[in-house]
Amino acid sequence: MLTLTDNAIKAIHRFTSGSDSAGSASGLRIQISGGGCSGLQYGLKLEEAAAEDDTVLEYDGIKVFVDPGSLPMIEGTSVDFVESIEGSGFKFSNPNAKNACSCGNSFSA
């Protein structure tokens, strides 16, 4: 199961209501792809609809779409949204990550 903190849910609500695609975006896609300094990286993208084979998770009116290849790699992950003097963004706490880069946006499993 993927967990979104209250801060992450609020941020996603802000992004979907404030984006040009807000009228057509029905959810947020979280996916894992190759890249980043540790080999795998997180990807976030507003989506109009889930793909046929997606797992759809719902949190306080937010739909999250996860493809079958990414789902095992984010199982148990907590997603937070942090704002600090250094910047703001989503922070992933992934128990499946064996190594992570210092920026926290890529990992190896």
Image (cartoon, helix red, strand yellow):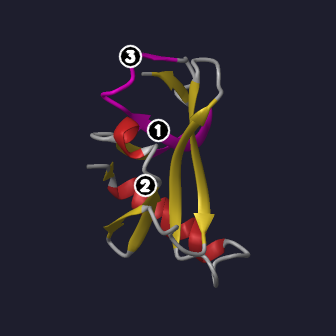
Q: Residue at x 50, y 23 (%)?
A: 107
User: Image quarter for residue 6?
Assistant: bottom left
N-term-proximal mark, 3 vs 2? 2
| Residue at the right extreme of this rendering | 20
Q: Which residues are magenta?
A: 81-100
Is 45 drawn above or below residue 63 in the view shown?
above
Q: CA distance from mark 3 to mark 1?
A: 16 Å
Left or right: 105 in relation to 99: right
Please indicate, yes or no, whether residue 85 appears anywhere in the rendered image.
no
Q: Position of residue 56 (x, y in %)?
A: 38, 65
Task: Please identify, in this view, whether the residue under mark 3 or under mark 1 is nearer the observer.
Answer: 3
Task: Please identify, in this view, whether the residue under mark 3 or under mark 2 is nearer the observer.
Answer: 3
Crowding near pointer 1: few (<14 within 10 Å), some, many (20+)?
A: some
Q: CA distance from mark 3 to mark 2?
A: 24 Å
Asked if residue 93 lies in the magenta stretch, the reply is: yes
Q: CA distance from mark 2 to mark 1?
A: 9 Å
Q: Position of residue 3 (x, y in %)?
A: 30, 50
The amino acid pointed to by label 1 is: Lys
Q: Any mark on residue 8, and which?
A: 2
Mark 3, residue position: 98
44 or 7, which lies in front? 44
The amino acid pointed to by label 3 is: Lys
Q: Position of residue 95 (x, y in %)?
A: 30, 28
Mark 1, residue position: 91
Please indicate, yes or no, whether residue 61 appears anywhere in the rendered image.
yes
Is 74 drawn above or below residue 37 in the view shown?
below
Residues at marks 3 and 1 touching, judged by CB atoms closer than 8 Å: no
Crowding near pointer 2: few (<14 within 10 Å), some, many (20+)?
A: some
**SS class of the residue under badge 3?**
loop
**SS class of the residue under badge 1?**
strand
Asked if residue 38 lies in the magenta stretch, the reply is: no
